Image (cartoon, grey):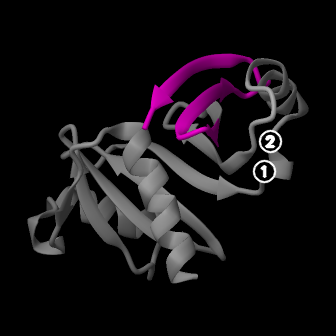
Amino acid sequence: MKKFLMSVMAVTAIVFAANAQKLDASKVPAAVKASFAKQYPGTKVKWEKENGLYEAGFDHNGSEMSAMFEANGTMTESEMEIKVSDLPASVMQYITAHHKGATVKEAAKITKANGEVNYEAEVKGMDLIFDATGKFLKEVKG
């Protein structure tokens, strides 16, 4: 489980930026900690700071997750690792057509604060981002 959590956090770090800094909880703004505690009561968390946002890495209901917060406590998005088989069929069709022979190493469901859902598939050391219907949006190199 510990290895799995580290994998999720590594994928998240690649998606958001390579400049993540581990952060002691005492350096996280009270508004951020309060917002996290309200949404995920009693959850153990590890903090990082990336591009001015505070990232919480944690286990929630048996799923490895991360959540991004602005300094005022507003959550901008959350990311949950999912099984590759839970990706929309159109995501797998795109990968088969555009990355022949590639294997999806990890997959995640990203939910933005406005409810918008994206999917992420790690293929050949890069993250492919898709919308909720499985339409390809962009590639993020790791």
**What is the span of residues highlighted in magenta in the rendered image?**
120-142
Name the quadrant containing residue 44. Answer: bottom left
Q: Which residue is mark 2?
A: 87
Write the residue at 54% across / 50% down: 79
Q: Tell whether position 130 is magenta.
A: yes
Determine if residue 111 is in view: yes
Does dot 1 land on a helix, a strand or a loop? helix
Residue 68 in percent (x, y) is at 37, 48
Give the residue type at disc 1: Val
Q: Is residue 92 left or right of residue 80?
A: right
Name the quadrant containing residue 47. Answer: bottom left
Q: Nearer the viewer, residue 70 or 20?
A: 20
Residue 20 in percent (x, y) is at 24, 50
Q: Which residue is mark 1?
A: 84
Residue 90 in percent (x, y) is at 86, 25
Does dot 2 land on a helix, a strand or a loop? loop
Determine if residue 116 is in view: no
Marks 1 and 2 in Cβ contact (< 8 Å): yes
Give the residue type at disc 2: Leu
Decide: few, some or many residues near mark 1? Use Cα within 10 Å; few <14, some 14-19, many ≥20. Answer: some
Write the residue at 21% across / 44% down: 19
Separation of residues labelled 1 and 2 (CA atoms) = 6 Å
